[in-house]
Amino acid sequence: MPLKSPFASWRDLSAEQRRHIQMAAGGITVSWALAALMACSTTGAQALLYQQLGGVAKIEAVTDRTLERVSTDPRTKRSFDGIKMPFLKKSVAAYVCKVADGPCVYEGETMANSHAKSNISGAEFDIMVAVMREELDRAGASEGAKNELLRRLAPTRRDIVKY
């Protein structure tokens, strides 16, 4: 047996009942819209850092350009003498991607072991950070994502800098 509505039609409702229904429908619509907006902003806020940085491809591009610049800069290029740059670029990109919660697997040495004989100075390290910051800006990384990545990478200084 079909269910019967208590009202035959919209016209059978009083003006006050119609107003209440309209307000309730409007409230439901606004609630759904707010829930959808909150879901979108929550997703953005919870996005992994590597996603905020533009994904694996952008991280690879940033690390590639950073290493290209510092390996040819007169102030830092001595640190890259004899280094196989294609291997280094791949390794650094994987490391940065991993630090940023990306899907990459870093299979290299610890920072202390890989830099043990490099005699990297604090100034050289600082130049690398400045260049990476510039490349992150160039890639369109947000200020928050850039700062978070650099905050996560900062502890490597004690393992890399020798003087």
Image: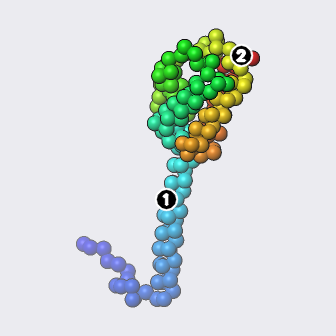
**Location of residue 3 (image quadrant):** bottom left
Compare marks 1 and 2 and give the one earlier in the sequence.
1
Label at residue 140: none
Tag 2 residue: 162
Task: Tell which of 56 and 22 is nearer to you.
Answer: 56
Residue 67 lies, with reference to residue 11, above or below; the image says above
User: In the current view of this chain or complex, which residue is farthest to the front?
Assistant: 74
SS at circle 2: loop
Residue 123 image point, x, y percent? 72, 25
Residue 116 lies, with reference to residue 20, above or below; the image says above
| Image label count | 2
Dot 2 amino acid type? Lys
Dot 1 amino acid type? Ala
User: In the current view of this chain or complex, which residue is farthest to the left?
Assistant: 1
Residue 133 is at least partly visible in this image: yes
SS at circle 1: helix
What residue appears at the point 32 percent right and 77 percent down from the top-left corner? 4
Residue 43 image point, x, y percent? 51, 49
What residue appears at the point 61 percent right and 22 percent down from the top-left corner? 77
Residue 110 is at least partly visible in this image: no
What residue appears at the point 59 percent right and 43 percent down from the top-left corner? 137
Query: Where the N terminus falls, by quadrant?
Result: bottom left
Tag 1 residue: 36
Residue 10 lies, with reference to residue 150, above or below; the image says below
Task: Tell which of 96 and 44 is nearer to you.
Answer: 96
Task: Tell which of 132 and 108 is nearer to you.
Answer: 132
What residue appears at the point 64 percent right and 10 percent down from the top-left corner? 117
